[in-house]
Amino acid sequence: MDRQAQALLERARRGQLRAIGRLLTLLEHPDERSLQLLEELTRGEPRAHVIGVTGIPGAGKSTLVSQLIAEYRRRGLRVGVLAIDPSSPLSEGSLMADRLRMQRHATDPGVFIRSLASKGLLGGLSLAALAMVEALDAFGYDKIIVETVGVGQADVDILDVAHTILVVTMPGAGDDIQALKAGVMEIGDIYVLNKSDKPEAEQTLEFMKFALEAGTVSARHGWMPRLVKTSAVQGTGIPELADAIEEHRGFLEEKGLFAQRVEDRRVKLARLYARSLVDGIVEEIVGERRAEILETLRKSPDPYRGILGLVLEELRMRLQRL
Ligand SMILES: Nc1nc2c(ncn2[C@@H]2O[C@H](COP(=O)(O)OP(=O)(O)OP(=O)(O)O)[C@@H](O)[C@H]2O)c(=O)[nH]1
Ligand SMILES: [Mg+2]
């Protein structure tokens, strides 16, 4: 690894937020340098508890995350947050809003917050996010909270490598049954009914209790999903939520699942890395040999087979040189 990266790494290890930020930026793009960094970062024992936060848009996820950060700080823990918005390159606005909502933690050295949008990420969002989780773990953050916007976004498979998944909903709007149908209520370890300060909250809570008890909700590895009600604006239910999260962590550790999920996460990271490298090379080849490809398209009786042969042959050669 070059000197500059080495120096950055040292400062990041000492908890310097700016160094951590710059390091995460290096990890956004899969290349030789980020690969070296990853090797370095994943040498130590993984310790962090990774918490995924998802749920219906506007349910109060970011506000809730901000409250959770405060609760963890009170408990003496360091917190890293990744706010992920896969929806569009136009996400700056909402990301800004998220950051503002969490801004009260901006000057706390025990908290690191990073927004991530798909824009300009060559290797994709999941790859960048997973690499950043490894980094935050290496830098000693006790809790890593990953907030994703929306549910079921195809390219955010970061959620299934989180240790604990929170699904955040809110009262009313008749959205609850929709949410159930959409499978939202199949992935949560903990269901959070936020905005419980609203009058319709009781009814929704009953409905969710029913859904949980009726087994509509599938449990992962025999864990009975918990239901917690919060009001992120009023700050109620937050210690209870943090306790439920700890309970789930205890469950994972007892069953040996805590370490297993770290392994799953690392295997996935390696897979995404490999895929993005191959993708990049294919793009290069198609760009460089465009003339030949067009020629094949015009003249060959089996143009696709021909193009594929051409690309794969070149790919084989370049892979050997890696
Ligand atoms: N009444 C009430 N409003 C809340 C509560 N929590 C959040 N809100 C409000 O709900 C709105 C959305 O909050 P966010 O935290 O941005 O919600 P989000 O789920 O992160 O939104 P997206 O990331 O856009 O999906 C904001 O206006 C919050 O002030 C709550 O507990 N009660
Ligand atoms: Mg949000």
Image (spheres, rainbow, N blue to C red):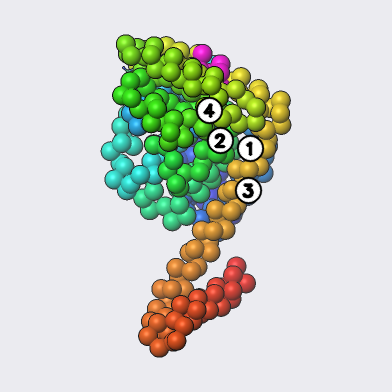
The relative height of residue 235 versus residue 142 in the rendered view (above or below) is: above
Distance, label 2 to label 4, CA atoms, is 18 Å
The amino acid marked with disc number 2 is Ala
The amino acid marked with disc number 4 is Val
Q: Are marks 2 and 1 in contact (CB under 8 Å)?
A: yes
> Neighbour class for label 3 at 10 Å: few (<14), some, many (≥20)?
few
Compare marks 3 and 4 and give the one earlier in the sequence: 4
Residue to which mark 2 is pinned: 162
Compare marks 1 and 4 and give the one earlier in the sequence: 4
Highlighted magenta segment, given as a residue range: 240-245
Compare marks 3 and 1 and give the one earlier in the sequence: 1
> Neighbour class for label 1 at 10 Å: few (<14), some, many (≥20)?
some
Q: Are marks 3 and 1 in contact (CB under 8 Å)?
A: no
Left or right of residue 129: residue 86: left
Residue to which mark 4 is pinned: 217
Tell me the quarter of the image containing the C terminus. Answer: bottom right
Compare marks 2 and 4 and give the one earlier in the sequence: 2
Distance, label 2 to label 1, CA atoms, is 7 Å
Residue to which mark 3 is pinned: 267
> Neighbour class for label 2 at 10 Å: few (<14), some, many (≥20)?
many
Q: Position of residue 82 (x, y in %)?
A: 45, 36
Assign the magenta stretch its main secondary structure.
Answer: helix
Compare marks 3 and 2 and give the one earlier in the sequence: 2
Name the residue: 39% across, 36% down.
Answer: 150
Using the image as rendered, state which of residue 231 and residue 76 is in the foreground. Answer: 231
Secondary structure under the numbered disc 2 in the rendered image: loop
Distance, label 1 to label 4, CA atoms, is 21 Å
Q: Which marked residue is nearer to the observer: mark 2 or mark 4?
A: 4
For ligand 1, the image quadrant comes to top left
Residue to which mark 1 is pinned: 261
